[in-house]
Each structure stands twice: as structure tokens, then as C-alpha cells.
Image (cartoon, helix red, strand yellow):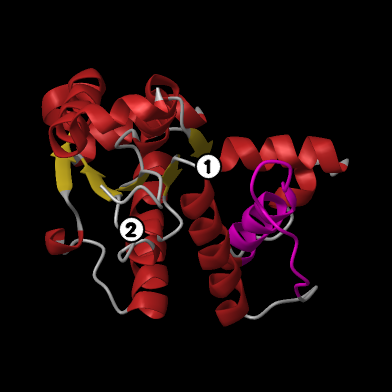
Amino acid sequence: MCIEFPLAISISRQLGSGGSVLGKNLAKELNFVFLDREIVRAAADRLGIHGEELEDNEEKINSVWKSFLLNFQYTDLFYAPVPIPIVPNDREIYEVEADIILRAAKEKPVVIVGRGASHILKDHPNHVSIFLHAKTAFRQKRSQEIYNISESKASKLIYETDITRQRHLHKFTGQDMYDLRNYNLTIDTSIVGLDIAEKIIMHYIQLRFGDKIRDYK
């Protein structure tokens, strides 16, 4: 384990497979910084930005940009402010996203859900890359419960989100989201459940990094 770099865990996931829940639980268990939509909301509160402003654009790429823009300004812990364009193009969006992730992973132990982090951190010496997937029925049920939507709307959301995430990743990295060679560990959460999935990940981390993981707890 390279002592110059803290441990960084990236979780790529299908919608409804439990990525955010597992990410939160792992971050809590390991005492890591957790980067996902929750920190965007916290940053919005601190910056005095109304939550609805984050949802005023229907295009996925702009929604992702706003989340990262807010994260980027959440500088108290480990980010240095960098001038960025007010209306960025897709490439500028991706570059800012990548910069945020690289800065975070270099300075603090982190758990990052989504955001293309599995590719962005591919050269990080202490990177654990995880992919969570699940059977459609499992994802559909969880999506209905989380978003309080009908079965048909959950099916549509899953279908559209799968396409959007795959296209976004391929556009900027050339990678296939479903190429398992891009990950250290893949788990079907519909088979083992979220609790066991968390234990599998923790066991993998402990086996790989040994006693050094205690430095973070």
C-alpha cells in the first residue's frame, strides 16, 4: 500500500442496486469521506442555493455538472478553488468532475459513488473499484420504494438511466460500463442482499490491505 495515497473506493452501479446505501455504510464503517448527492445538498445549503435550482435542467449532463460544481466549491476539507466557466461544455464538465475526484482521493480516504470514478482513479495505487448490479425485479422494487413511483415508471426510469450512464461513460472514457475487467470486485446485490454485499466488500478490503486499514478507522 502506497502511504502517499489514502484508500479510495469507487462504486459503479446500476440504478436500484443499492450503491448509495452501501457507499454510505462503508464510509461510516471506515470513517471515510462520502461523496454522492448528499454532499451536494449540504454544499447547496452552505452556499445558500435553493434545492430546486439543482433540478431546473432536464438534461442529465447539466444535472451532473451542477452536482459537481457544488461539490467543487465545498472546499473546507480538501479542495482548492479553481476558476471554471459559467456555462461549460461537456468536455469541461468531465474535466472538472475528474479533477474533483482526483483531488479528493489524493488528500482523504474516500468512498465515491458513480461519477465515472472507477475510470478516473484507475491509476490510483490504493483504489478499490466495485461494480454493483442486480436483477431487474429487484431494481424495480427498490426504485418504486425510493422514488415512490409506479412499476411502469420505475421500469422506464431504469431503462433510461442505464442508457444514459452507459453513453456518458463511453463518451468520455471509451469504456463499457458492463466490462467487468474494469473492476476489482462485482456483486449481484439481488442475490446476496445489501448487508452481505457490504460484508463482502469489507472482507475484500481487509484481505487486500491488511492491518493498514486500521490507520483510517
Residue 72 horizontal side relative to residue 186, left or right: right
At x 69%, y 58%, the residue is 69
**Is 201 on the left or on the right of 22, as rendered?**
left
In the rendered image, residue 109, in percent from the top left (x then y), is placed at: 45, 40
Q: Quadrant of the C terminus?
A: top left
User: How far across and down, in percent of the image, does residue 137 sit?
Assistant: 21, 34
Magenta extent? 62-84
- Residue at image position (39%, 61%) is 165
Residue 189, visible in the rendered structure? no
Residue 41: in magenta span: no
Quick one: 14 or 88, which is closer to the camera? 88
Helix, strand or loop for disc 1: loop
Q: CA distance from mark 1 to mark 2?
A: 14 Å
Q: Mark 1 = which residue?
A: 36
Q: Is residue 45 above or below residue 155?
A: above
Give the residue type at disc 1: Asp
The residue wearing badge 2 is 118
Q: Tag 2: residue type?
A: Ser
- Residue visible at 36% across and 43% down in the picture: 7
Q: Earlier in the sequence, mark 1 or mark 2?
A: 1
